[in-house]
Image: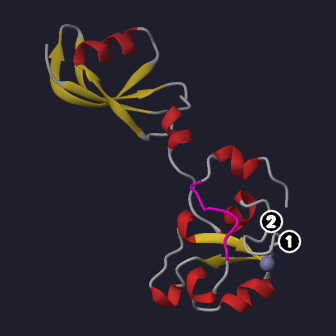
Amino acid sequence: MSGSVTVLNADYQVLHTVSLNHAIRMIVRGVAEVHESADELIGVFIRPISVRLLKYVVTTWRYQRQPKWSKAGVLRRDKFTCTFCSGRASTIDHVIPRAQGGKNTWKNTVAACSPCNNKKRDRTPEQAGMVMKIIPKIPDWTDLYRQKP
Ligand SMILES: [Zn+2]
């Protein structure tokens, strides 16, 4: 027996592929059900093309995958602290301004207070002569969820 079988999570998200033998063992053990099958028998089994886990599996990659960028996320990551003056941040600032092609990404955005944001305008910190006290980074999930606004 050869070939690989796609394993789907209980919510039908594709997880990975396993060998046909492995997939049949999963079905026999009752951890997975046949989701799609080929018109072919493997012994007493219909040959699975994909199997679906019966119990939802929380995958580690879900946590490794970087959180989606959001303005609220940037504020939380930077603990609502303005990167320029350490005052209370109420907005975000684009390190490379959008007018200069800067994007909404974790590394291009920092928390800022309105006065600093207005002062910097459509300039980089260097162009505005402003010093960033926080180096923007991609947050992990705990950075985003431990902070209360
Ligand atoms: Zn400020």
Q: Is residue 67 visible?
A: yes
Classify mark 1: helix, strand or loop.
loop
Q: Nearer the viewer, residue 72 or 46?
A: 72
- Direction from residue 112 to residue 141 in the image, left or right: left
Q: Secondary structure at mark 2?
A: loop
Residue 123, given in percent of the width and then of the height, sits at: 57, 89
**Quarter assignment of residue 142:** top right
- Pick the quarter of the image with the C terminus: bottom right
Q: Name which residue lies at 73% across and 91% down.
A: 118
Q: Does label 1 or label 2 sit earlier along the sequence?
A: 2
Asked whether residue 133 is drawn in magenta, I would say yes
The residue closer to the viewer here, 60 or 15, is 60
- Describe residue 50's horizontal placement relative to residue 130 as left or right: left
Horizontal and vertical percent position of residue 57: 53, 28
Q: How is colour applied across the structure in the image?
A: secondary structure
Q: Amino acid at mark 1?
A: Arg
Residues at marks 1 and 2 touching, judged by CB atoms closer than 8 Å: yes
- Identify residue for label 2: 80
Count of numbered circles in the view: 2
Q: Is residue 49 visible?
A: no
Q: Quadrant of the N terminus?
A: top left
**Main structural element of the magenta stretch: helix, strand or loop?**
loop
Compared with residue 73, is residue 17 higher up or lower down, i.e. above or below? above
Q: Which stretch appears magenta?
A: 131-138
42 or 89: nearer the eye? 89
What residue appears at the point 58 percent right and 57 percent down from the top-left corner? 137
**In this picture, is 135 found above or below 108?**
above
Q: What residue do we see at 81% from left, 69% from top?
A: 86
Left/right of residue 29 with respect to residue 24 in the rendered view: right
